[in-house]
Image (cartoon, rainbow, N blue to C red):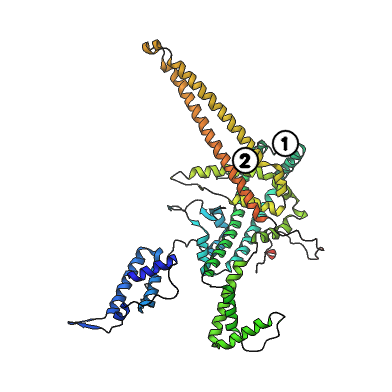
Amino acid sequence: EERAKAEAEKAHVGKQAEGPPPPPPLSDVLDLDPLRVLSRRVHIKRRVQRYLEKVFYDLTVVALHDWATYAEMKSLASMCYDIELRDNRLPAGSLDVGLDVLRIMQNIDVFVARFSYNLNQQNFVERKPDRGSKNVRSIGIRSIAVSLKQHGLGVLNTTVNYTYQFLAQKFDVFNQFLYDDYVRSHLSRERRWFKKHREECKARYPFERAQDFAKKIRKLGVGDDGRSFLDHFRALLTEVGNALGYVRMVRSAGAEFCADAAAFVPDFDDAAAFAKAAAADAQPTAPAADGEVEEDVEVLADADRLSLAESSRVAAANYGVVVGSIRKNLNEGRDYFQVLVNVFKKVLTSGEHSHLDTFYALVPALCLSWVEASLKAKDRMFKKVRDQEAYYTDDGFAVGVAYVLAILDQGSKFDELHWFDAVALKLKADEALIKKNLAEREAKEKAREKARRGSVVDRVFGRKKEEDEAPESIDITRATSTMQLTARRCAATKQEYELLYFSIQGSRVFFLRNEPEPAKAEPSAEPAPAGPGDDDDAPTVD
């Protein structure tokens, strides 16, 4: 038991030598025939076998997440001592296993609504736990990689197709909201106003106008959950960004899975050459091109020298397919985001969707809604009873905004608003005003404290009634506390806007074109697709 445990620990830290360890002298004792001791018959190997079965079973029951260690110790016992242990019939558990990747794809609409995406760490955290649950679920790259080991790398293409179908449904709602007469007329009016007063506002979209639009939308009505139509539209963009974040996380998990599998391949070129030589037939082939004759002859000669059986040739061919698949996925440079951008761009940028041209003017109001919701959610994180959504990260909104701006080619138009510059100036002015008021309050407090003390005679004979000044002192203290709270709130708001700015800028990198603009082709005779909801336009990823 101790030797198997030591070898297993060496394997985990990468110190185990190649091949099985040499059998110790104890193996000779285990190979002895059953011994007769007094009136009892003792079988040493069978007793060791029962002991190890009991120990491994008990330890696995105590810690199911450590099942892999005991399974490896079981294999080492078989290699070193020729002791075959029975299966303990216990489920294999692991802390790396989370929600199944196929289950997420089949319910992607529920998943993107209940989980929040973290752009930097590439994980999802549940917004609100189930009733009665004391924990929140999280999904990261490692858990998806473990799921890919079970389902294979074909899940990557399936994920893109499922995401396309989900995005098509969301863009239908997106289209209907911006087609509304009130929203469309207001955005058109804002665009005309900014063009007319661009010099007066120094090319910065005013913070107050975004606030005014958010208030007007709220006057149209709110739902049972207290959210306005603008909040629901912001949630829609967040769900779109979460879906794209899931595609990115699955792609990263696939790369990690391939990297883990590639660690067991000594050399890709040698493995491919061996598989080709072992699976080749001795039949004559067509003459090769210049520079490849010697290589083909050498491969056929290797195949003749190997003289492998048919089953060995089939196994070698399968080995070559697996190694080739790992190599292909490691070197694959397909940009799934660009595929999802192009498939919607040709529909949403057509003349039938001209009402989407003013989407960039709606982003400032959406940012206000996101910051307000983020601050409330982070405040709920410190409460014991979480009857509403509470989260510390929500980068899906930034990814969704960057994605829509890339589809509609409105990134440069949004940059012309210099929205975040206007926000920075507004918050800077608020901070200066708060500091000024705090300084005035502190000066008044010191003056009042000095006047309250009075002279020594007044303090000795008590001529000054401190009871008359108590209410006024309480009011001053409350006002100071309110200002300090406002200062902390302003600092938190500034931090949220900076986080949103960097998240949007970082997300826009995903949708940049790396290749040069192609030359204009002749117009195609094929009819344009009817709308983003048609499944016939789904991106095909080989």
Task: Out of 275 and 104, give the one closest to the viewer.
Answer: 275
Q: Quadrant of residue 219?
A: top right
Depth check, mark 1 against mark 2: the one in front is: 1
Which residue is painted at 55% across and 57% down in the image?
A: 111
Q: Which mark is residue 234?
A: none
Where does the image place residue 14, in percent across and percent down from the top left? 45, 67
Q: Secondary structure at mark 1?
A: loop
Residue 38 vs residue 495: left or right? left
Question: Could you tell me if residue 232 is visible in this image?
Answer: no
| Quadrant showing the C terminus | bottom right
Question: Could you tell me if residue 496 is visible in this image?
Answer: yes
* Figure check: 529 above or below 452: below
* Figure check: 40 above or below 115: below
Q: Quadrant of residue 332?
A: bottom right
Q: How many marks?
A: 2
Task: Out of 500 and 524, give the one closest to the viewer.
Answer: 500
Task: Indicate the amino acid at tag 2.
Answer: Arg
Label 1, on which residue?
A: 202
Q: Are there few (<14), some (14-19), or many (20+) residues within 10 Å of tag 2?
A: some
Residue 69 vs residue 201: left or right? left
Task: Indicate the amino acid at tag 1.
Answer: Lys
Where does the image place residue 25, in percent across and percent down from the top left? 32, 78
